[in-house]
Amino acid sequence: MKEDENVMTPEEDPAGGMVPEDEKDEKTDQEGSKKPGKKRPFLKGLLTGLGISAAALLLWRGYIDIPFGGYTLTIFMPTYYLGRIIDKDNIDYRNVERKMKEIDRYIDRYYYYEKDPDAMEEGAVAGLVYGLYEEDPYVSYFTADAFTDEMQSIEGNYCGIGVTVTEDTETGGILVLAVTREGPAEEAGLEEGDLIIGVDGEDIRGVGLNTATSQYIKGPEGTVVELLIQRDGEELEISCERRIIETVSVHHSMVEYEGRKAGYICVSSFENNTDDQFDAALTELTEAGAEAIVLDLRDDLGGSVSSAVGILDRILPDDDHTYADEENMAEEKGTLLFYQQDKAGERRYYYAEDGLSCDLPIVVLVNENSASASEIITGVLKDYGYKVVGMNTFGKGIIQSLIQLSDGSAVEFTTAEYLMPSGYSLHKKGIAPDVESAPDEVLLENGADMDAPDPKTDNQLRTALDTVFEN
């Protein structure tokens, strides 16, 4: 018999005899009940249950937090990191939750001031969006109030007193940057540089810019708002009636130059009503006998693409098929203005179709701060043979979409690129001028005046006039 075969034989009794199977079970149970090590079935079951629970939690979350002497010990499952390596394209919300809870514990323990959970939640959501900033510097997050203000700004009108403001970082008050001409604030005597510190008897210092404008300064049409302002070290009370304020983004005038008349149209921004203002300005100047048009887009950072489409549609005829092809079917739909392409490669084409056009020579005046919608107009007109004067434009050839969330807040990020009729992508390259003209010392010192353009003090305007009358 082999030595190791002993483990397979029946048990022997103390006397050396064999124990019958039925007696063996009973004896074993009786003896086992007397052994100290067998008195802990509850503890064993508890430990087993805890182990199973811990394993399940690890499988579900990937980690476990264990309080330890005032600190937190975190145990990670090895596959937690493996999963993060494999799934690189998605956010690991388990890790986000763990880290945020850890930070929150430190805030509760050490933060000197009172924390605001609502503000922290908004900040956490905003952080998610701004995590895209390195690749997309045009991302934004808007609270519900900020989104309402943004939409009013885009529409080009709002109900208020007619001021452009910002928050003064030193005092927390609201600093007046500009006063709308012929608006309620100007009529009431409000001036650029005034500091608004109170509204209707309430101190608004420190409430923040969005709250101050949306909840205090703006309000129903026809109501009166009482402002407490600081000016030159004195406090003044000013009453303003709230009215519908239309943002003026188009300024125009007739310029006499070497015995000829040129219509000057300056577009300072693109709101949803900018194309209507442009149409009115172009019509007025044409009827007044303008021989040519200078379209000034200097320092225009862009805005509403729909207004850019409207302006191009107003200028270009509907039947120019220079860039017609089978894909965009321009021959059937009209003059191709530009097109945009999204992440999936889908394209959307824009055409001239209003039945209107401008027969006057047009020169586009731009600089390094002309961006986005300004560059759409500049690039499209250049493709169709119009001259561009000034400096190379900024180079923003991408489109952002504003998406409202279920709680009224909103996010904005890049969703597409736009291309010229020729297929040219201007992003990060801009539009090069046909006639380069840098600002001289006089223009740099005085700046351009969009309300009273003067070619004597504006050398870029002078170059634009020379160019448009040469052609």
Image: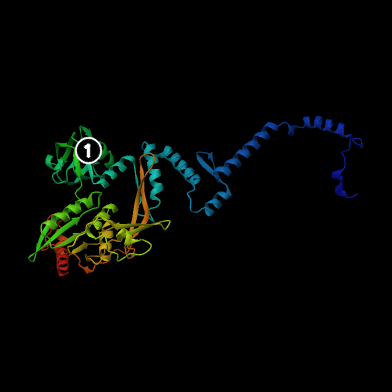
Name the residue nearer the viewer: 249 or 272.
272
Question: Which one is in front, 28 or 55?
Answer: 55
Q: Nearer the viewer, residue 176 or 314?
A: 314
Q: Is 112 rendered above or below residue 456?
A: above
Residue 118 vs residue 224: left or right? right
Q: Quadrant of residue 290?
A: bottom left
Give the quadrant of the C terminus.
bottom left
**Residue 137 horizontal side relative to residue 359, left or right:** right
| Label 1 neighbour load within 10 Å: few <14, some 14-19, many 20+ | many
Residue 205 horizontal/vertical position (percent): 24, 38
Q: Residue furthest front?
A: 332
| Colour mode of the rendering | rainbow
Residue at x-position 85% and y-position 33%: 24
Rendered residue at 18%/40% (across/down): 161
Residue 323, image quadrant: bottom left
Residue that carries the numbered disc 1 in the rendered image: 217
Residue at 64% across, 36% down: 49
Does the rendering let one see residue 396?
Answer: no
